[in-house]
Every structure is written in structure tokens, then in C-alpha cells.
Image (cartoon, helix red, strand yellow):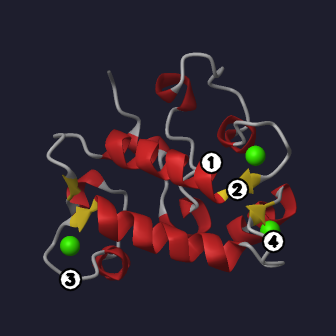
Amino acid sequence: MIIAKKAAPWLFAAALALFASVAPGQADVTTPPSENPFAATDQNDDGAINSEEYRYRMLETFVLLDEDGNGVLTISETTFTDPADFDRVDANRDGKITIREFLIYSGYLFEIADVDEDGDLSPGEVDAFDSN
Ligand SMILES: [Ca+2]
Ligand SMILES: [Ca+2]
Ligand SMILES: [Ca+2]
């Protein structure tokens, strides 16, 4: 399987990585590649992304990014161009992002994006976050 790392912009703007098109067509064969990443993440089709749907997407994203499958991400497996961005996620600064570090950081992004704090990300909240 070809991993579309380049198509997986991450972090901030992009990084509600869920909205990053981590080749949704590859991650889920039932999802047409052209489908809106939001819709692909919103598995119960209620028009919002809850924390479970988000977490699932994050795990999927992590696995797709982890090219050598060793369970950690190194900077070369990410699309970070600024090492400071990588360090922000790499909490213990050992040069590797573990799944735990990844989920903690992405959970933090979820909270920031969930402006009305209802535990769901609406399309509007995602758009607002993306354009920041
Ligand atoms: Ca949903
Ligand atoms: Ca680390
Ligand atoms: Ca919300």
C-alpha cells in the first residue's frame, strides 16, 4: 500500500489530522477517495465528530504515517518542516512521537477546536480551526 504521506498535512491547520486526507480511500475501502474527510470521519452520520470518531481517525492516521511500522513516528515520517512543530507533539523530546504523545496532543487540538465545548466538532468548528 502506498502511503500518501504528502497528502497528510498535519498539525494545526491541517492537523485535526482527521481532516487531513490521509488517503481515506485506502483507510476505508468503502469511502470514495473524493469524499469529504469530515464525512468520512463522521461515522454515525450525525453531522458532527465526537471524541470517539476523532480518536479512531487519529489512530488510523498514526498507523498510516508510521511507515516502518515500529509504533513511533520520527520526523521523517511526518510532514513537519519546522522541528519546533515536531517537538510540540514529542512531549519528552526523544525525537520520537509515540501513539500516546500523538493522542494527547490531538486530544488537546480537539478541545481547542470544540469552541462551544459540547464534545462534538461541527463542520463550522472544523472550518474555523482549519483557517486559523
Ligand atoms: Ca458523528
Ligand atoms: Ca517522544
Ligand atoms: Ca463542538
Q: Amino acid at mark 1?
A: Glu
At x 16%, y 40%, the residue is 68
Q: Label 4: few (<14), some or many (≥20) within 10 Å?
A: few
At x 28%, y 81%, the residue is 91
| Label located before the other in sequence (2 or 3) | 2
The yes-or-no answer for disc 2 within 8 Å of ligand 1 is yes
Q: Label 1: few (<14), some or many (≥20) within 10 Å?
A: some
User: Mark 1: which secondary structure?
Assistant: helix
User: Mark 3: which secondary structure?
Assistant: loop
Q: Observer-nearest residue: 118 or 60?
A: 118
Q: Observer-nearest residue: 125 or 79?
A: 125
Q: Amino acid at mark 3?
A: Asn
Report if the CB atoms under discs 1 and 2 are less than 8 Å apart: yes
- Which residue has dot 3 on it? 92
The reply, left or right, for residue 74 in relation to residue 84 is left
- The picture places residue 49, in percent across and down from the top left corner, at 72, 53
Please tell me the numbered disc located at residue 50.
2
The label nearer to you, 2 versus 3, is 2
| Label located before the other in sequence (1 or 3) | 1
Outermost residue toward the top?
30
Above or below 116: residue 23: above
Quadrant in which ligand 2 is drawn: bottom left
- Asked which quadrant contains residue 125, the reply is bottom right
The yes-or-no answer for disc 3 within 8 Å of ligand 2 is yes
* Figure label count: 4
The reply, left or right, for residue 56 in relation to residue 47 is left
| Label located before the other in sequence (3 or 4) | 3
